[in-house]
Amino acid sequence: MTGRTQAPCDPRCIRVDSIRANPNTAIVRLQRKDLKTMIDGVRWLADTSPANWINPLLHPPFVDTGSIVPVGFESYCRIFHPIRSRELGSGMITWAELATRNDRHVHPEMQFHAISTPRGTPSPQTYERGIGPEWGSLPLEERFELIRQLGPATQTRERCWFLMWEGFGDVSFGSAARVEIGQRDYAMYAGPIEAAAISLNDRVPSNSPNMWWPEDRAWIVVTDIDFAWTYVGGHEDIIGRLVSSQTLEAFPCQITDKPFYNSDTLNK
């Protein structure tokens, strides 16, 4: 590949061996003292052409899930980010638990605002950032589970591509090249699949990549900045394993599902 601004990401800076040896406990190894090393290992790429395949496979903006996730994969799932809120009376609960608590319907097109109040009471009129699940970033524990599940599902786990939205104010992009996907601009870096766990800032939890996929395109992970969930596209068996995971709250979904604020018609 040509046109890199600097050398590619060095896998050694990501504690790859510890993640592979014990992915379920590797999360505790990522202490603040490791962040500087991980950040120094990332090199933004000047050549963003490996992302050129995505735009032609997107639906027009604001149509459906296919406006955010490229079409063409055999199967898809939607991973709901866990709800961490003291106001809800628990350190962490699932969307299904919250919906059940409020006598709401549990289904793949749930919207957080629509299940966050008891049936018969009005839902908030707008999204409320900072309340409930994490928005625009897949939490670290869920990233580790995806690394564990998706790693064996690609022949190129050592060569993956990662896009980070340029609007993260606490990430230093410098003069990195940008690639426009849909209607957003991203910077790009490369590395093994474990690079999805890299922290690019000094906050905990860190921002996740917004899109990542292996060179053989066996799957793709997409976390839109405006959503509190993540999509994965891949072979049917890959998606089946994610849906069955005890770590993830994942539902099978369709590329034609509506992911927008007013799309949860079952919980109006």
Image (cartoon, rainbow, N blue to C red):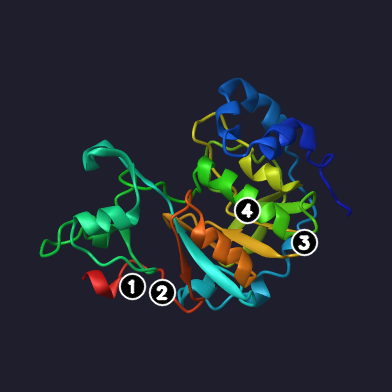
Dot in front, 4 or 2: 4
Question: How far is the residue under mark 1 from the one under mark 3?
Answer: 33 Å
**Farthest residue, direction left:** 120
Q: Name the residue under label 2.
A: 258
Q: Name the residue under label 3.
A: 50
- The quadrant of the picture occupied by the C terminus is bottom left
**Farthest residue, direction right:** 2
Earlier in the chain: of badge 1 and badge 2, it is 2
For residue 58, say whether it is visible. yes
Secondary-structure class at tag 3: helix
Secondary-structure class at tag 1: loop
Earlier in the chain: of badge 4 and badge 2, it is 4
Q: Label 1 amino acid?
A: Ser
Which label was assigned to residue 43? none
Q: Are marks 3 and 2 in contact (CB under 8 Å)?
A: no
Question: How far is the residue under mark 3 from the one under mark 2?
Answer: 28 Å
- The quadrant of the picture occupied by the N terminus is bottom right
Relative image position of residue 265 (x, y in whole percent): 27, 75
Nearest the viewer among 244 and 231 is 244
Nearest the viewer among 236 and 214 is 236
Around disc 3, counting alpha carbons within 10 Å, would you say few (fewer than 14), some (14 to 19), or many (20 or more)?
Answer: some
Around disc 2, counting alpha carbons within 10 Å, would you say few (fewer than 14), some (14 to 19), or many (20 or more)?
Answer: many
Relative image position of residue 55 (x, y in whole percent): 65, 71
Q: Label 2 amino acid?
A: Lys
Dot in front, 1 or 3: 1
Secondary-structure class at tag 4: helix
Tell me which corner region of the image, top left, top right, bottom left or bottom right, holds residue 182: bottom right
